[in-house]
């Protein structure tokens, strides 16, 4: 798959994810805002009548809480879990340091690396000589 096609798919996926999330949040807010007052003290028939005044879709979801869970809340939780997993994978991918081959280094970088290695080797040899003298 080309980079351009992959980029288009990623942007489309993000757009669909955002659109679904916003829609589900709006439905949840409308559900809570239009819930009939005192619904705990109403009979089932009264509650269904009051909920039907909120429109066919919202009224149906208010009277059928199981359907609301599977259509409204479960997809929100699933999208949240999916977004967290994608975020973790992206952070791991970005945080991984690329391996550098010696052939990829410039001459100045190679010289600096040699100087650093020589300094470390000299420090180790001096340390070994001090240990021999102390024994």
Image (cartoon, rainbow, N blue to C red):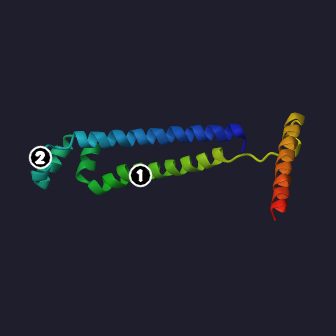
How many neighbours does mark 1 have within 10 angstroms: few (below 14), some (14-19), or many (20 or more)? Answer: few
Nearer to the camera, 47 or 122: 122
Label 2 sits on a secondary structure element that is: loop
Q: Residue furthest top?
A: 108
Gap between marks 1 and 2, in whole Å? 28 Å
Labels in figure, total: 2
Q: Visible in this render: residue 124?
A: yes
Splitting the image into 4 quarters, where does residue 131 fall?
bottom right
CB within 8 Å, label 1 to label 2? no
Q: Which of 67 and 124 is in front in this view?
A: 124
Q: What element carries label 1?
A: helix
| Residue highlighted by disc 1 | 77
**Residue occupying the far front of the picture:** 134
Residue that appears at 50% across and 40% down: 16
Q: Which residue is drawn at 50% across and 49% down?
A: 84
Residue 33 x/y as whole percent? 23, 39
Q: Which of 96 and 114 is in front in this view?
A: 114
> Which mark identifies residue 38?
2
Crowd tier of the residue under label 2, counting other residues whose Cα lies within 10 Å: few below 14, some 14–19, many 20 or above? few
Tell me what residue is drawn at x 67 percent, y 39 percent: 5
The quarter of the rendered structure image containing the C terminus is bottom right
Pick the front one: 38 or 121: 121
Label 1 or label 2, whichever comes before in sequence order: 2
Circle number at residue 120: none
Where residue 113 sits, quadrant-wise, is top right
- From where the camera sits, is residue 55 visible? no
Where residue 119 sits, quadrant-wise, is top right
Residue 75: image x %, image y %?
A: 41, 51
Residue that lies at the very extreme toward the bottom in this rendered image: 135
Is 59 displayed left or right of 118 in the figure? left
**Figure quadrant of the N terminus:** top right
């Amino acid at each position: 798959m080309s980079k351009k096609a992959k980029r288009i798919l990623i942007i489309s996926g993000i757009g669909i994810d955002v659109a679904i999330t916003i829609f589900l949040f709006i439905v949840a807010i409308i559900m809570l805002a239009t819930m009939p007052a005192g619904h705990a003290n109403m009979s089932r028939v009264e509650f269904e009548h009051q909920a039907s005044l909120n429109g066919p879709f919202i009224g149906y979801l208010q009277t059928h809480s199981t359907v609301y869970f599977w259509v409204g809340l479960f997809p929100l939780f699933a999208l949240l879990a999916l977004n967290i997993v994608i975020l973790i994978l992206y952070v791991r991918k970005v945080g991984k340091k690329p391996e550098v081959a010696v052939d990829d280094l410039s001459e100045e970088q190679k010289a600096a690396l040699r100087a650093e290695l020589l300094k470390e080797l000299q420090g180790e040899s001096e340390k070994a000589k001090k240990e021999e003298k102390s024994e």
